[in-house]
Image (cartoon, rainbow, N blue to C red):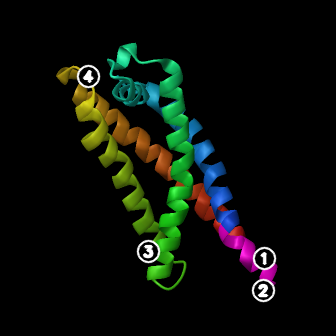
């Protein structure tokens, strides 16, 4: 293989991760409103950052948090995949599955363990928010993994 192509493979994977994350975030935007309180997680995060109730959190902050986190999670997935490929001596399905499971766990765990408990959300709404976030995050990860994995085979 041409050394120039080989040297560009890893950086291109991060670009693919960023583009795939943008698409996955837009898909997540379609999934979130299908659940009661499904659109609340970005406002929960914005509320924590601004010390307000989610219903009083600025929508600009909620959008910034949502889209920034969504975009940056793509390169994180690529990094995790490269890490597991290095540990397992090559690109394998196992490396992708491990990266996928860890990413999903980080996404859901961070929100449910760090962000949500610090919010000013009524206790009655917490189970609905947990469920909506877990399902929306699963949709995001599914789209992200399919797009990154598909594009990576072409590189």
Q: Earlier in the sequence, mark 2 or mark 4?
A: 2
- Measuring 42% from the left and 39% from the top, which residue is drawn there? 136
What distance separates the C-alpha of mark 4 from that of mark 3? 38 Å
Callout in the foreground (4, 3): 4
Secondary element type, mark 1: helix
- Look at mark 1 in the image and give the residue it sits on: 5
Q: Is residue 39 visible?
A: yes
The prevailing secondary structure element of the residues shown in magenta is: helix
Secondary element type, mark 3: helix
Secondary element type, mark 2: loop
- Look at mark 4 in the image and give the residue it sits on: 121
- Measuring 27% from the left and 27% from the top, which residue is drawn there? 119
What distance separates the C-alpha of mark 2 from that of mark 1? 7 Å
What distance separates the C-alpha of mark 1 from that of mark 3? 25 Å
- Look at mark 3 in the image and give the residue it sits on: 94
Q: How many neighbours does mark 1 have within 10 angstroms: few (below 14), some (14-19), or many (20 or more)?
A: few
Q: Is residue 93 visible?
A: no
What distance separates the C-alpha of mark 4 from that of mark 1? 50 Å
- Measuring 66% from the left and 57% from the top, which residue is drawn there? 16
In the rendered structure, does residue 127 fall within the stretch colored magenta?
no
């Amino acid at each position: 293989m041409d050394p120039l192509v080989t040297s560009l493979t890893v950086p291109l994977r991060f670009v693919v991760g960023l583009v795939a994350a943008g698409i996955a975030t837009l898909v997540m935007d379609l999934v979130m409103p299908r659940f009661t309180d499904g659109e609340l997680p970005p406002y929960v995060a914005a509320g924590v950052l601004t010390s307000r109730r989610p219903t009083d959190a600025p929508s600009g902050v909620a959008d910034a948090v949502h889209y920034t986190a969504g975009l940056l999670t793509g390169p994180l997935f690529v990094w995790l995949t490269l890490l597991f490929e290095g540990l397992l001596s090559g690109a394998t399905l196992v490396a992708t599955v491990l990266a996928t499971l860890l990413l999903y766990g980080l996404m859901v765990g961070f929100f449910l363990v760090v962000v949500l408990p610090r919010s000013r959300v009524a206790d009655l709404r917490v189970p609905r928010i947990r469920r909506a976030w877990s399902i929306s995050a699963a949709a995001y990860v599914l789209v992200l993994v399919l797009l990154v994995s598909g594009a990576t085979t072409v590189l």
